[in-house]
Image (cartoon, helix red, strand yellow):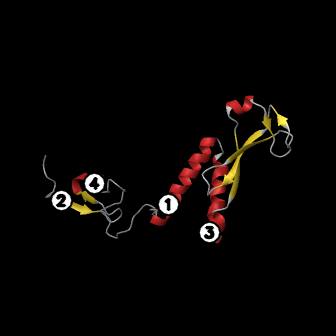
């Protein structure tokens, strides 16, 4: 193996990574695409930076999204819940911990076959209806219940 210590290199002003000049692709950084030949020092492409404070929120959104979509909830409804949660967090963080949600999800195979009791009217039904998961975002558990077709 040869050492690359004496190979000409520079630091990319965009991504702040050390880049060897023989690795440049068309005069651009191979990691971010920033042109190292520009004299004005501005990047030709739109560059969006993610701050560290956003990283925790993105991880939270990913796990909530994954959890509810794994249950069969529609992505649009999950994103609405996350947007509402973000609004509540900005207004009143204490109230955000108690925020309630309910999502309509598809029934599991066994649920379709077994008799179910309607949460609203108490009737027992076999076919139709819908399954709903509800709870608050602070607790790890949520309640799963059914609603009959007439309700």
In this rendering, would 50 be left or right of 114? left
Q: Earlier in the sequence, mark 3 or mark 4?
A: 4
| Gap between marks 3 and 4 measured at Cα | 47 Å
Residue 90, horizontal then vertical, whole percent: 62, 69
Of callouts 3 and 2, the N-terminal one = 2
**How many other residues sit within 10 Å of disc 2, few (<14), some (14-19) or many (≥20)?**
few
- Locate residue 49, reporting x and y percent: 45, 63
Mark 3 secondary-structure assignment: helix
Give the vertical position of 114 relative to 9 (above or below): above
Mark 1 to mark 4 CA distance (whole Å): 33 Å
Q: Tag 4, which secondary structure? A: loop
Per the model, the C-alpha gap separating discs 1 and 2 is 38 Å
Task: Indicate the position of residue 60 as horizontal and vertical percent values.
Answer: 54, 56
Q: Is residue 130 above or below residue 3?
A: above
Crowding near the residue tagged with mark 1, few <14, some 14–19, many ≥20 C-alpha atoms within 10 Å = few
Mark whose residue sits in front, 3 or 2: 3
From the viewer's side, name the closer residue of 16 and 115: 115
Q: CA distance from mark 2 to mark 4?
A: 11 Å
Residue that mark 1 sits on: 56
Is residue 21 left or right of 141 when viewed as pictured?
A: left
Question: Residue sitting at 50 percent across and 55 percent down?
Answer: 59
User: Looking at the image, which is closer to me, 105 or 134?
Assistant: 134
Label of residue 93 in the image: 3
Name the residue carrying label 2.
8
Nearer the camera: disc 1 or disc 4: 1
Tell me the crowding category of disc 3: few under 14, some 14 to 19, or many 20 or more residues within 10 angstroms, Cα based. few
Disc marking residue 24:
4
- Point out the tag, 2 or 4, that comes first from the N-terminus: 2
Determine whether the residue tagged by mark 1 lies in a helix, strand or loop.
Answer: helix
Corner quadrant of residue 5: bottom left
Q: CA distance from mark 3 to mark 2?
A: 52 Å
Numbered disc in front, either 1 or 2: 1
């Amino acid at each position: 193996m040869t050492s690359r210590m004496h190979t000409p290199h520079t630091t990319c002003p965009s991504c702040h990574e050390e880049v060897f000049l023989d690795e440049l692709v068309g005069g651009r950084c191979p990691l971010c695409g920033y042109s190292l030949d520009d004299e004005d020092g501005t990047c030709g492409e739109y560059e969006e930076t993610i701050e560290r404070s956003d990283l925790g929120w993105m991880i939270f959104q990913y796990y909530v999204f994954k959890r509810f979509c794994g249950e069969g909830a529609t992505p649009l409804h999950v994103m609405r819940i996350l947007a509402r949660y973000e609004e509540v967090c900005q207004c009143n963080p204490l109230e955000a911990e108690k925020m309630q949600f309910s999502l309509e999800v598809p029934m599991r195979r066994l649920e379709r076959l077994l008799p179910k009791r309607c949460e609203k009217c108490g009737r027992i039904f076999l076919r139709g209806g819908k399954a709903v998961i509800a709870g608050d975002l602070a607790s790890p558990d949520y309640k799963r219940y059914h609603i009959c077709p007439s309700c």
